[in-house]
Amino acid sequence: MTPARPSPKARVLPLAGEVITLDPGHDGGNAARPDIINSLVNVITGQKACDTVGAETDAGYPEHAFNFDVAARLARLLRRDGAKVVPTRSADNGVGPCITQRAAIGNLAHANAAISIHADGGPAGGSGFEVIEPGLVPGYTDKIVGPSRRLGLDIRNAYRAITGEPYSDYIGVSGLDVRTDLGGLNLSTVPKVFIECANMRNSADAAKLTSAAFRQQVAVALAAGFVAFLHKR
Ligand code: ZN
């Protein structure tokens, strides 16, 4: 007798019921609209530009395109695992949104976890990745510092193991950093981290970032980090 195969719908998906906000940094139309993206917004610990153009490799592969492609790949994996994914932008040819709005989107969604996806424009001689966690901004980040720290550790560990990318050798400590100057973290009410996936200005890192196979590995790693974090709550 052939055992009945379980129906896919009957299976409990690993991220069923979870809401995850994905924030691909920058946007493809930013460079053409300095009038919009250079306007200042309040990030609690200071004033910052609404948004920025982002980095690019020496060959001209832009960070906004990398961030958007990784977010799209990651969204597919998370949705396949049952999560509701709320992105901060749904195209790569727009302007913004402002960093304050990017945080607000995750807050309004009551996301269980959120990530801002970036690639750094660091010194050409430096390489590696880092995860950035919110520091304590009294009255703002009090409730998210602890869970964001745990999210950051799970993301860092999965990223290191699955992509093989080393910890940054020019910023942070053991692939981790804590900052209080980022609006996307200061204004978040949900557990959130940033990741700088590698250094676009380093030739070896740039070769990886330009590879679709590597970007898929990045997405797989980030998805694994979310699963690890959300299953421990
Ligand atoms: Zn960036």
Image: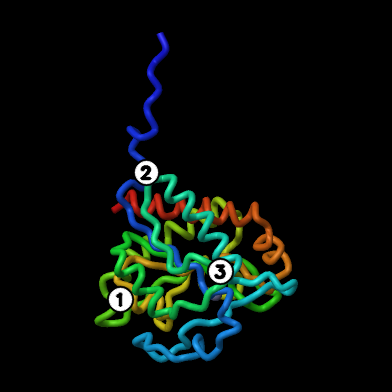
The answer to whether the residue bearing label 3 lies less than 8 angstroms from the nearest atom of ligand 1 is: no
Q: Amino acid at mark 3?
A: Asp
| Distance from Cα at disc 1 to Cα at disc 3 | 29 Å
Secondary structure, mark 3, is loop
| Distance from Cα at disc 2 to Cα at disc 1 | 28 Å
Q: In the rendered image, which quarter contains the N terminus? A: top left
**Horizontal and vertical percent for residue 111?**
32, 62
Q: Which mark is residue 92?
A: 3
Q: Amino acid at mark 2?
A: Pro
Secondary structure, mark 2, is loop
Answer above or below: position of 18 versus 201: above
* Residue 28 located left or right of residue 176: right
* Residue 166 located left or right of residue 80: right
**Horizontal and vertical percent for residue 214?**
63, 55
**Horizontal and vertical percent for residue 113?**
36, 61
Secondary structure, mark 1, is loop
| Residue assigned mark 1 | 141
At x 35% / y 68%, what residue is drawn? 106
